[in-house]
Amino acid sequence: MKLAVALLLITSVVFAQAPEVPDKMQFAGITLTIRDDARREIQKDVNMLTQSAKHHNIKVERAKTYFPVIEKIFAEENVPDDFKYLVLQESALIADAVSVSNAVGFWQFKDFTAIEMGMRVDKDIDERMNIVSATRGAARYIKKNNYYFNNWVYALQAYQMGAGGTMKAIKDYQSGTKHMTITTETYWYVKKFLAHKVAFQDYVKGAGEVKVYTITNRNRRSIKDVADEFAIDEEQLRQYNKWVRKDHIPDDKAYMLSIPTIGESAKRNEAIARAEATNPLEQPKRIDAEPARAASVTMILHGIPAVKAIAGETPSALAKRANVDLSGFLRYNDISVSDRIRPGEFYYLKRKKARGPVSHHVVIAGDDLWSISQQYGVQLRKLERYNKVDRDNSLKAGSIIYLTNKRTMQAEPQVEDAVEIETGDTFNWTVQPQANPVPDVPATPFPPQQSIETKTEMPSADSVKADTLVLQQHVVAAGETLYSIAKRYDIGVMQVVEWNNLSLSEGIKPGQILLLKKPSEKVPEPESREIIHTVKSTDTLYSIAREYGVTIKELMDWNKKKDFSLSVGEKLIIVKKR
């Protein structure tokens, strides 16, 4: 109630006139020239967004509350800060907003897509309504789209219509461009986004009436207990944590709690200061009474117990503190007794796994093979084998490190089949949960007229038999990418990679000859066999689908399930190919 009263007392913004749409704008490092016809359309949307001072100011206050959280996550994920205005367009920063196509939450994720992006969605927890979890998912989805296009405007368009739809809609491919023109032909979603940016960018600066602190929690606790700890009203806490659908926060992983503050409270400020000492936006962390204690707490990372190192520790001291055998500790973490311990890093107390929880990792500045091994709990020697590199190799930002054997990875889905967030009937239920599409990281803009092509002498199409291979060669021109070449020949990126034994991390070079071939032989359909899986307490449909390399949709069809609920001891049919 106190929060509601405080918001009602906010002084309304009175507009003499709506903000004016300029003829040039900056978006994500791209200079946009806005033609008069498009400028008039965008101005109409700006006028509508600002015509009610009351409603505009409500959104401004929500933005001031949540934008600091979003800005920090986007900075960590290397997503342009301008994308924060997209959340106003998607949900007006209403946590439990639901679209007509059942997309939910701050960033309007559908359930399957949210699960693919690492969120939990079930009857107890819906992280689409968690500002931290949903924003991280949105950042990863936006980045995934940008890997296809190397153009943030197209990545924005793909957020609504999907990567496949965007590729079909693009008439003039502009990879890596720094200048674009917005016309009346520009996709409506992009123009509406620009209207939101114009309508709000000058009003969301400074602190809001309500500030939200994000605190990591790994313990099973009730909402009431948390409210008592931070000296806030229980109902107020629930309003900012609608992702908790029941009375308790589970302890299956680290969850980010939003703690709203308005006014002063010595008890709450003390609790927040204590919790913030754990560096809240870096998962996993845990709230404890003393920071020193928190550093020694054992965590479960990727199903493996681990301990956080503190400054000044040696491998021997850390193993002793964790109460594990030194030789085993060194082996589990791929280190020697003379190696320096990295403060703040998590070290495993049992053997790491042979494969990662996702198919690949995109290298960022500062990454090395060992840190990636620790981040995902994957044995270092396995990463060396999967990627044909050793731990001493320097890694280039933007390159791909595979976390599983490429030969066992499922074929990359066609871009048209990529998981969508808010695309109505185009949402694909059949996307395999095990592997996200492996992105082709574009290099420089692709000028189509500069490409060079050579073809082998081939018989006419009518004379080619069904069981032969049609061969082509393409000489890589300066500025071309795997995506632009694949698009030109209407084939998949991963087909080009496979046929030429390419490494995505190394990319392609001008003058390189690529073989393009279209196999037409039909492979006999393998026989099927049924496996019975007995549901355990830790199982979800997503984890079972990953375990057997099938889709969630297939699981639901085979077992005639109408929702995601599972019961311990339930028998599920899995159809596997022989």
Image (cartoon, helix red, strand yellow):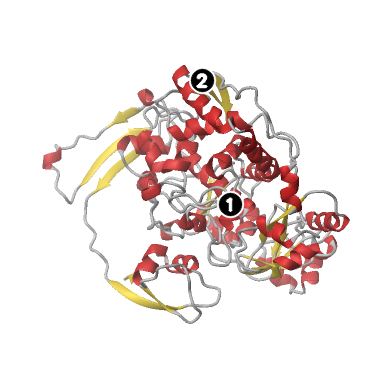
165 relative position to 97: left or right:
left
Secondary structure at numbered mark 2: strand
* Residue under numbered circle 2: 33
- Which residue is at a point 74% across and 41% down the rendered structure image? 208
Packing grade of label 2 (10 A; few <14, some 14-19, many >=20) is some
Is residue 282 visible to us here?
yes
Marks 1 and 2 in Cβ contact (< 8 Å): no
Q: Quadrant of the N terminus?
A: bottom right
Residue type for callout 2: Thr
Question: Is residue 551 something that shows in the picture?
Answer: no
Q: Which residue is mark 1?
A: 134
- Residue 487's spot in the image, x, y percent? 35, 37
Residue for point 45% across, 40% down: 158
Quarter of the image where one finds residue 316: bottom right
Q: Residue at position x 58%, y 64% from top?
A: 125
Residue 385 location (% of width, % of height)? 52, 57
Viewer-closest of 517 and 33:
33
Q: Is residue 11 left or right of residue 132?
A: right
Q: Residue at x 80, y 71 (%)?
A: 320
Instruction: State how far apart marks 1 and 2 are (Cα).
Output: 32 Å
Q: Report which quarter residue 521 is drawn in.
A: bottom left
Quadrant in the picture for the C terminus? bottom left
Q: Residue furthest right?
A: 266
Whole-percent x, y for residue 418 in the image: 41, 49
Observer-nearest of 125 and 295: 125
Q: Quadrant of residue 517?
A: top left
Amino acid type for the residue under numbered disc 1: Ala
Q: Secondary structure at mark 1?
A: helix
Q: Is residue 145 above or below residue 564?
A: above
Is 1 positioned to the left or the right of 538 in the image? right
Q: Measured along the vertical axis of the image, is residue 445 above or below residue 570?
A: above
In front of the other: 316 or 98: 98
